[in-house]
Amino acid sequence: MSNRRILYLVEIMGILLALVWLFPFYLMGVNAFKEKRDIFADTIGLPKTWTWDNFVQAFEQLGFLNAFGNSLLITGVSTVLIIIFSAMAAYALSRNKSKFSSWIFFVFVASMLIPFQSVMIPLVAQFGKLDMLNRGGLIFMYIGFGASLSIFLYHGALKGIPESLDDAAKIDGCNKFQTFWYIIFPLLKPMSVTVGVLNVIWIWNDYLLPSLVIGGNGTETIPLKLFFFFGQYTKQWHLALAGLTISILPVIIAYFFAQKQIIKGISDGAVK
Amino acid sequence: MRNRDLSFWLFLSPVLICLIAVVIIPLLNGLFYSFTDWNGLSLNKFVGLDNYTKLLSDNEFMTSFWFTIKFSAAAIIVINIIGLGLALIVTQHIKSSSFLRTIFFMPNLIGGLILGFIWQFIFTKAFAAVGDAVGIEGLKGWLSTSETGFWGLVILTSWQMAGYVMLIYIAYLQSVPQELIEAAQIDGASKFQRFRTITVPLIAPAFTVSLFLTLSHSFKMYDQNLSLTNGGPYNSTEMVAMNIIKSAFTDNAMAYAQSKAVIFFVVVAAVSLVQVFYNKKREVEL
């Protein structure tokens, strides 16, 4: 077989696999448009009549706009704070060559080995006592859990930024904060994209932590709302699937606008 | 910046305070609580190792641990084989390369909870429909036995994670120097020989990274477990994370649940350390 023919076969195989990969989304999407009895009559095929009712009902029952707003607020604020605070800390740790500094860095890296389930029970009890089981407390926790990986990534990137830049800025009259904010932080932008992508995907989709910290008072995020919604409509797949489709849609739209940055961000983050 | 500089501490303190409050203190507190009769609010007395000895005879916990180990082993193998396969496909000079990457990676953007619900529909409804249509009995009643629950979780996790490790393998595959491959080709090495003797040793770090990632991900998995099987039937597909959460927040046995959490931490940390150490050593030898 010629080389070109082999490549042709590889391409066909890749496309077939891609269709397999997309099939779960197809099943979710088409069945969300079906009436209840059509799902059982024909699960795989396209709907006989396309109905929007499921979506309208799911949208209302989920309180989707409210949940979307909460998710956006919590994910946005947590990610921005993680980016700024972790970059600052990584900068301080990389420019301080003392034993103490590398020891602190080691503590951050080592804490990545601690599974969330090992600390969650005392964590929730402790924050309950402080009356911090709310959105503010949740953001605080996300910074604590997200900082380690982010500092690790920034620390690696900072090795590539020569310290002569810091000295030059100092001679020009910058203090430490100005040096960081005007010189170093802009140079870290590619890594900030990676850190941002990783944290947004994690926080946006997280279920367990918010389920322990917030709930029942209109501050729920999308995964929390969806879990309750699903419990209520467990035998009514037409509504459940419409709810799932609505929840996924914003993510898919965002993905198609920013797929290059997302894929590059994940690759850079995973390899380091 | 030096240790005594105020700026050093100002830069460091926001994340340091969060880490200490959210990870370090709860970890130490948790270790302490696991030796007491703590109920979440107050504690009356030390019970020594009672919580830990109780663990050993707790069948449900032991079953969930064993299930987690079996699941992780199966998931790691399947995810890495598929992930490497996908990476090999999309790094060929084919037109749809970047489109395929986008598709294979897509499930990673969506939360495990949602993915679990989607696959619950597929396993229970779509599988049954296909089984009826073509007359395969094996496609009916998925997730209603522990066997199908197990493989259901493996399939879901593989579909989700394969695209992630694919990106890792791609990064390393692309850094293999093309001259080496061409030189071997001139020496008459077949495509398979080139792959086995040049590519595989050079992408060894990719195995480290991917195995570590998939192991820690599958070992700690909760959301997918909750939404796909919720531990059923009869707790037979319950993983450790879910067992701990149920002990703590359903049975309210806080101190006992925390002793499970401590064991869980020790195992996760030990396995991760051994694996990183072992792989680092192997990379150097190559």
Image (cartoon, helix red, strand yellow):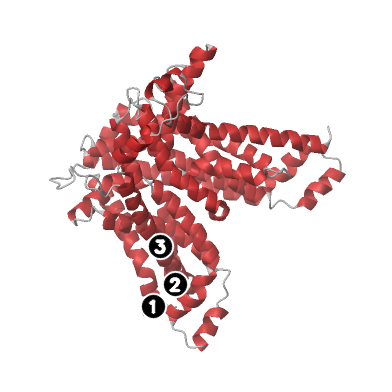
Q: Which mark is residue A92?
A: 2
Along the line of sight, the residue nearer the viewer: A64 or B198: A64
The 10 Å Cα crowd at callout 1, few under 14, some 14 to 19, many 20 or more, is some
| Real-space Cα separation, disc 1 to disc 3, in angstroms | 21 Å
**Residue at the (65%, 35%) spot, across then down:** A15
Q: Nearer the viewer, residue A213 or A119?
A: A213
Query: The residue tagged with tag 1: helix, strand or loop?
Result: helix
Judge whether B133 appears above or below A5 on screen.
Answer: above
Q: Position of residue A58 (x, y in %)?
A: 34, 36
Badge 3 is on which residue?
A: A80
Chain identifier of the residue bearing label 3 in the image: A
Crowding around mark 3 (Cα neighbors within 10 Å: few <14, some 14 to 19, many 20+) is some
Residue at image mark 1: B7
Residues at discs 2 and 1 in contact (Cβ within 8 Å) = yes
Where on the picture, by quarter, is residue A109? bottom left
Residue drawn 57% across the image and 46% down it: B208
As drawn, is A250 to the left or to the right of B255?
Answer: right
Residue B149 shown left or right of residue A45 in the figure: left
In this image, B62 relative to B119: left or right? left
Residue A122: percent from the left, percent from the top? 25, 49
Question: Is residue B4 depicted above or below B58 in this figure?
Answer: below
Residue B282: horizontal and vertical position, in percent?
62, 47
Q: Secondary structure at mark 2?
A: helix
> What amino acid is labelled 1 in the image?
Ser
Quadrant in which the N terminus of chain A is drawn? top right
Task: Tell which subunit mark 2 falls on.
Answer: A
Q: Is residue B244 visible?
A: no
Measure the C-alpha gap from mark 2 to mark 1.
Answer: 8 Å
Residue at mark 1: chain: B
In this rendering, the label closer to the viewer, 1 or 3: 3
The amino acid at mark 3 is Val
The earlier-in-sequence mark between 2 and 3 is 3
